Image (cartoon, coloured by chain):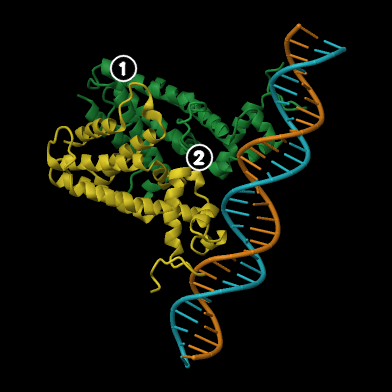
Chain colours: A yellow, B green, C orange, D cyan
Amino acid sequence: MAKDAQKQGYHHGDLRRALVEAAIPLLRTGGPDALTMRALARAAGVSPMAAYRHFEDRAALVAAVADDGFKRLHARLRAAAESPERTLRKPQQTARAGLQAIALAYVEFALEHPDEYRVMFGSKLAADPAIAPQSRNEVFAFLREGIAMLQRQKLVRAGDPQAMAYTAWALVHGLVMLAIDGQVRGKGAPSPEELTLTATELLMFGMAG
Amino acid sequence: MAKDAQKQGYHHGDLRRALVEAAIPLLRTGGPDALTMRALARAAGVSPMAAYRHFEDRAALVAAVADDGFKRLHARLRAAAESPERTLRKPQQTARAGLQAIALAYVEFALEHPDEYRVMFGSKLAADPAIAPQSRNEVFAFLREGIAMLQRQKLVRAGDPQAMAYTAWALVHGLVMLAIDGQVRGKGAPSPEELTLTATELLMFGMAG
DNA sequence: AGGTGAATGTTAACACTGTAAACATACCTG
DNA sequence: CAGGTATGTTTACAGTGTTAACATTCACCT
């Protein structure tokens, strides 16, 4: 019974998980700045220094929260890929529509949880290999696999799928960042969803041979 | 003689500018976290609270630094647009090549000063209208004007230039963010410049009618 | 069973941060 | 020259990350 996440007595049970989970409500209310070691420990009902038994320093803690976010994002994208009933506008070939549905799910996730998304791409986590969120690579691999599949179906022109995946990711990531920063809000500006649709259509036009 | 930026005696001369300028070396050495009120004041040879005579709080100071960054970025893009000798690969129609040169200049700027770029898009500055960097809008307007010009020359398909400009900006911004985060570094990954070229070509293929 | 080392949590302390309040000085305008 | 205003300073407080020393509990071995 050592794997259970009880939280009574001197030892916590699974403090590491508790800390990472306590991060979400903190983020939603106070933004990324509220993600402090001490506040996290407080939320988990534990003394400030307890967190340091599980994370080297604040950067490592933040990286773990980011990693958790990428896991949830990955799950969301997979779900969107498997039930692509959300093909708005021009269903076209279903494979491409599926890719578009994935892009929409990505944008939705980020706009629903902007602070989490900001943490995921906040500090230069990927630079330090010790704490680089590995789930991030899985998300990217998922995307690249999608592109490669479209190539096999001749729905996307031949070429390095890696570079194309980077391009697609950059486009969606950029859209999200601009939207989160409140930059798309000006008068006459399209809604983020509308913008995502037109943007992905433009890109897929270019990728289609 | 009140407008000169002397720094002797009780009054500084132009402390506001001095603070914003002191931010750059701090950023380059210590990253965005080194951008503290007290460190800035120290660098300007002034007491910690002096900064508060010119900036409401830290967020406002950071916003001013970001605004300064957007001004320099804007200048850089304008320079790239006026001397487009940098047309690598497939010069095509010169107007489109010019847009590609602008994209390259954008990426170069960001990769040369990653910490400044991170500050520019760091906290949600644009959300608070009181401190939202206005130079940012000018950069976007510049980009949108470029797209509109291409439309007039029939080099880009008709459509809302605003949405297209958002798309182009998002693509480049996303590329930069991924590159800065060290995400493009994996084996077999293209160089950021190479990636920028292929990405912009894909997008322009889609935007061309 | 009992003891022992490792894992985990706690308390105390330090240097640093943002920022409010009260005070001091220099400039500028009448 | 007088006085108000802009600017800079000192002091103080709460909150932060993090180190060091100490305390408790768990897991395992004989």
Please indicate whether residue B146 sits to the left or right of residue B34 in the image. left
- In depth, the one of B137 and C18 nearer the eye is C18
Does residue A167 appear to the left or right of C11 in the view shown? left
Q: Where is residue A136 in the image (x, y as percent from the top left)?
A: 35, 51
Q: Residue B115 carries which label?
A: 2
- B96, above or below A36, in the image: above
User: The residue tagged with tag 1: helix, strand or loop?
Assistant: helix
Tell me the kind of residue under disc 2.
Asp
Picture coordinates of residue B160, whole percent (x, y): 27, 21
Q: Which of marks 2 and 1 is nearer the N terminus?
A: 2
* Residue A52, x across and y down, in percent: 53, 61
Callout 2 and callout 1 share a chain: yes
User: In what quadrant of the picture does the C terminus of chain A appear?
Assistant: top left
Q: Is residue B86 left or right of residue D9?
A: left
Instruction: Look at label 1 and name its amino acid.
Output: Met
In the rendered structure, find residue B149 and report the number of the disc placed on it. Answer: 1
- Residue sitting at x 36%, y 28%: A184
Image check: B60 left or right of A201? right
